Amino acid sequence: MMELALASGVGVLVACGIYLLLRARSFDVILGLTLLSYAVNLLIFSMGRLVVGKPPVLTKGLAATLENHVDPLPQALVLTAIVIAFAMTAVLLVVSIRSRADHNSDHVDSAEPDDDTRPGDRS
């Protein structure tokens, strides 16, 4: 049951991330990339087998097998990926804020659509 919940969570995060990546605003793209990085982190974390109550570090008195311990490598990879994703999100935010200041637009390619009528302007 836990595998189904985690797989569904990863699927929802990927779907939302791809939807936001396809939007034309830079904040939506950054948010979509962040959701995709969360999905990848959960996927990597699940590769270490979903087990409750087993230590990831070898302890005295227990045999050093996967029956008694959890694989610590996916946990270390996820921790590293979280740090890298945080740094990349900060860089992307700075670049998008600078792009908005330079071009007066939040659009990804710095060009607003050629739409003459906007939803609030009905003159």
Image: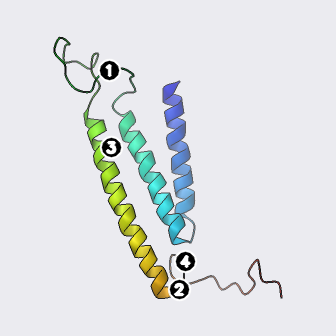
Give the numbered dot on residue 107: 4
Q: Nearer the viewer, mark 2 or mark 4?
A: 2
| Residue farthest along the right direction in this orientation | 123
Q: Residues within 10 Å of mark 4 (few under 14, many from 20)?
A: some
Tell me the element at label 4. loop
In the displayed image of the protein, which residue is found farthest to the left? 60
* Image vertical order of residue 46 relative to residue 29, above or below: above
Please tell me which of labels 1 and 3 falls first in the chain: 1
What residue would you read off at disc 1? 54
Name the residue that disc number 2 marks: 104
The label shown at residue 78 is 3
Distance between mark 1 and mark 2 Cα atoms? 53 Å
Q: Secondary structure at mark 3?
A: helix
Answer few, some or many: residues within 10 Å of disc 3's Cα (few below 14, many 20 plus, some between 14 and 19). some
The relative height of residue 81 versus residue 71 in the rendered view (above or below) is below
What amino acid is found at the position of numbered circle 3 in the picture? Val
Q: Are marks 1 and 2 in contact (CB under 8 Å)?
A: no
- Residue 89, horizontal then vertical, whole percent: 39, 62
In the image, what residue occupies the spot 50% across and 60% down?
A: 31
Which of discs 3 and 2 lies nearer the camera? The answer is: 2
Closer to the chain start, of discs 3 and 4, is 3
Indicate whether 6 appears above or below 62.
Answer: below
Residue 46 placed where, x, y %?
Answer: 39, 34
Q: Secondary structure at mark 1?
A: loop
Place of residue 97 in the rendered image (x, y in percent of width and height, measured from the top left): 45, 76
Q: Assess disc 2: are there few (<14), some (14-19) or many (≥20) residues with their C-alpha within 10 Å of its C-alpha.
A: few
Residue type at mark 4 is: His
Badge 1: few (under 14), some or many (20 or more) residues near its Cα, within 10 Å? few
- Amino acid of disc 2: Asn
